[in-house]
Amino acid sequence: VQLQASGGGLVQVGGCLRLSCASSGRAITSYTVSWFRQAPGKEREFVAGVRFNARVTHYADSVNGRFTISRDDAKNTLYLQMNSLKPEDTAVYYCAARVGNPALSYLKTTEAYDYWGQGTLVTVSS
């Protein structure tokens, strides 16, 4: 599968953005897919994930209640709706995919994923 992330940009504190991750190749329904982010000088961290059956989602504590992950199976696209953005949300955001249904602790690690998009930059200005 190939992943193409888009939708990043510059937004003010409190604003919102929607990121997209278009998937080509095998249907996205075959994969557990997640969003990660990497701020300057920091390690890449888990943001949100949705399991291949699309009935279970997971969020990092830092974004829970503000971000929503969703998947459009017809469009083979993953989304991340980001609301109430904060300066600390500034980062390059990556989508990632893997086959299977890993344990939650593993799902939140970069090592769990075989496929990565190229990243899209989100900058939140105060």
Image (cartoon, rainbow, N blue to C red):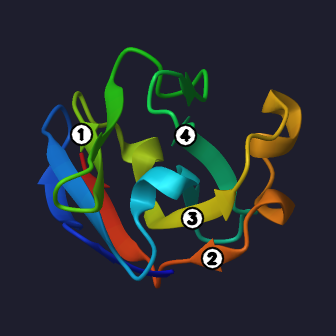
- State whether residue 72 is above or below residue 97: above
Q: Does the residue at mark 3 contact the one at mark 2 (Cβ under 8 Å)? A: yes
Q: Residue at x 69, y 62 (%)?
A: 44
Residue neighbourhood size for the residue with mark 4, other residues' Cα within 10 Å, grouped as few (<14), some (14–19), many (≥20): many
Mark 2 = which residue?
115
Q: Residue at x 33, y 23 (%)?
A: 66
Mark 1 = which residue?
81
Nearer the camera: disc 2 or disc 1: 2
Q: CA distance from mark 3 to mark 2?
A: 5 Å
Residue neighbourhood size for the residue with mark 2, other residues' Cα within 10 Å, grouped as few (<14), some (14–19), many (≥20): some
**In which image quadrant can residue 107 be found?**
top right
Mark seen at residue 49: 4
Apparent side of residue 32 relative to residue 81 in the rendered image (left or right): right
Q: Nearer the viewer, residue 118 or 88?
A: 118
Closer to the chain start, of discs 4 and 1, is: 4
Q: Nearer the viewer, residue 12 or 74?
A: 74
Q: Quadrant of the C terminus?
A: top left
Q: Nearer the viewer, residue 79 or 85?
A: 79
Q: CA distance from mark 3 to mark 1?
A: 16 Å
Residue 79 at x, y percent in the picture: 28, 50
Which residue type does callout 1 highlight?
A: Gln
Q: CA distance from mark 2 to mark 4?
A: 14 Å
Mark seen at residue 96: 3
* Label 1: element kind: strand
